[in-house]
Image (tube, grey):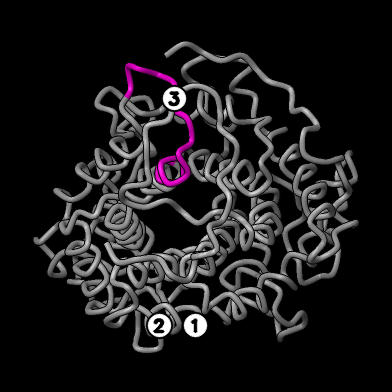
């Protein structure tokens, strides 16, 4: 694939605004704020300057390969919600550089850190590109949707019936032995969400069947409890009888969005509407901060208060926000509940983006009411996804079977909402 040179972002949508200037429900304010946060997010990336196989698409250590896939998903959201194409060539270069020799995101260079969950997060970005007809200009590489199916086709055979009655292990390769004995919610939830989105994007019943299978298995072994709380995982060597009760924002978000997609796929029939609502209700535990000091402000209870969130965990709130905004778009009846959580969180995130040399770097603990002194890629992504999602209500929903095309060349104008978001037909 021909490499694309670094691109300087152009002020094509709005002027840069300090996040502290955020005004909810003011589109110009939101655009300017997220423009600034996106710029600061991309300041962590230099792969399109150094342009070597080891640096293209990835962010410098200590960030793992998976977090780069997550970051490009955030930037795809930025492009879609704002219409600002400044970073589109860089996004395209990053995605296409990682497809691997079989176009399935099995990348030999990153085998050492590639698990089922890592591959799933790259698939989310690829599905975002497919569902928005994001251009794919390289004739030597398949369309985005085909790549997403290729990824799925590598994961389905890893469904492991040797323990727990099924499920994906955390890791793919025996060189990572600990993860080979752990069946976790992010790997299985990721596979569930992939299956649901592919069901909607293709109309293929196989994906519907697998989405049902993965969700039912997750509930049966206790990764999802009767109150719709999502737990981290369970030991395969103990037949998943030792559920790890730790809970994180992002897995709750993954299953919530997957359920909302399935509700759309089935035309609102069956259990998926209730499951979506149950998962969304259970998500409220992740809002409020210690002792509910900041009602409806998102936090990561497992690690934030104690100050032990690692580089992965600092980004988890980004995916909760992304998937809850996606849920509201896919199942509009949930929007009031989603906005009740994410609008206060967006304001708190904006207030936290007031540090660093730029004076706009984003902090970690939003419930403190300001900048807490901790900065990083994860902190940028969490603020970006939470605030730019305020624009999701006026953005076009994900395209589905019959609408997705292989678009080549330059980026077309962003699609406009049809006004039928709540009337999507069953495939």
Q: Which residue is mark 2?
A: 228
Is 46 drawn above or below residue 368 in the view shown? above
Q: Residues within 10 Å of mark 3 (few under 14, many from 20)?
A: some
Q: Position of residue 109 (x, y in %)?
A: 37, 25
Q: Which residue is mark 3?
A: 408
Q: Residue at x 45, y 39 (%)?
A: 133
Q: Position of residue 399 (x, y in %)?
A: 42, 51
Q: Residue at x 36, y 48 (%)?
A: 120
Query: How much space separates mark 2 and mark 3, taking CA atoms?
Result: 41 Å
Is 150 drawn above or below residue 367 in the view shown? above
> Is the C-beta separation of discs 2 and 1 under 8 Å?
yes
Q: Which residue is mark 1?
A: 282
Q: Earlier in the sequence, mark 2 or mark 3?
A: 2
Q: Residue at x 80, y 66 (%)?
A: 24
Q: Earlier in the sequence, mark 3 or mark 1?
A: 1
Which region of the structure is painted magenta? 126-141
Query: How much space separates mark 3 and mark 1, taking CA atoms?
Result: 41 Å
Q: Earlier in the sequence, mark 2 or mark 1?
A: 2
User: Hey, which residue is sitting farthest left in the picture?
Assistant: 162
| Quadrant in which the N terminus appears | top left
Give SS at disc 3: loop
Q: Nearer the viewer, residue 81 or 187?
A: 81
Q: Residues within 10 Å of mark 1 (few under 14, many from 20)?
A: some
């Amino acid at each position: 694939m021909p490499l694309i040179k670094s691109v300087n972002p152009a002020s094509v949508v709005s002027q840069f605004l300090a996040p502290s200037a955020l005004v909810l429900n003011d589109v110009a304010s939101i655009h300017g704020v997220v423009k600034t946060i996106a710029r600061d997010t991309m300041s962590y990336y230099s792969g399109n300057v150094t342009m070597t196989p080891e640096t293209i698409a990835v962010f410098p250590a200590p960030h793992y390969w998976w977090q780069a896939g997550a970051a490009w998903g955030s930037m795809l959201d930025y492009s879609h919600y704002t219409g600002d194409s400044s970073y589109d060539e860089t996004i395209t270069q990053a995605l296409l550089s990682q497809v691997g020799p079989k176009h399935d995101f099995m990348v030999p260079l990153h085998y050492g850190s590639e698990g089922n969950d890592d591959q799933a997060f790259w698939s989310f970005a690829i599905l975002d590109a497919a569902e928005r007809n994001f251009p794919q200009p390289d004739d030597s590489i398949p369309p985005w949707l085909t790549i997403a199916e290729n990824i799925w086709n590598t994961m389905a055979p890893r469904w492991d019936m040797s323990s727990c009655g099924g499920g994906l292990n955390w890791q793919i390769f025996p060189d990572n032995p600990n993860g080979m004995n752990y069946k976790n919610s992010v790997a299985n939830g990721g596979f569930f969400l992939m299956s649901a989105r592919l069901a909607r994007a293709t109309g293929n019943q196989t994906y519907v069947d697998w989405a049902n299978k993965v969700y039912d298995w997750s509930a049966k072994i206790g990764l999802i409890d009767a109150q719709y709380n999502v737990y981290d995982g369970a030991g395969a060597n103990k037949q998943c009888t030792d559920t790890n009760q730790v809970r994180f924002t992002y897995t709750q978000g993954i299953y919530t969005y997957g359920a909302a997609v399935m509700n759309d796929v089935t035309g609102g029939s069956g259990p998926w509407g209730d499951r979506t609502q149950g998962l969304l209700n259970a998500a409220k535990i992740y809002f409020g901060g210690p002792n509910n000091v900041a009602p409806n402000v998102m936090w990561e209870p497992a690690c934030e208060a104690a100050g032990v969130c690692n580089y992965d965990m600092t980004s988890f709130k980004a995916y909760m926000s992304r998937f809850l905004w996606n849920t509201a778009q896919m199942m509009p009846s949930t929007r009031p509940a989603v906005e009740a959580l994410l609008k206060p969180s967006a304001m708190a995130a904006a207030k936290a983006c007031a540090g660093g040399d730029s004076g706009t770097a984003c902090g970690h603990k939003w419930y403190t009411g300001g900048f807490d002194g901790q900065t990083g890629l994860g902190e940028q992504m969490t603020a970006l996804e939470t605030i730019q999602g305020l624009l999701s209500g006026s953005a076009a929903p994900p395209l589905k079977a019959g609408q997705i095309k292989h678009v080549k060349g330059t980026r077309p104008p962003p699609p406009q909402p049809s006004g039928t978001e709540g009337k999507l037909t069953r495939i």
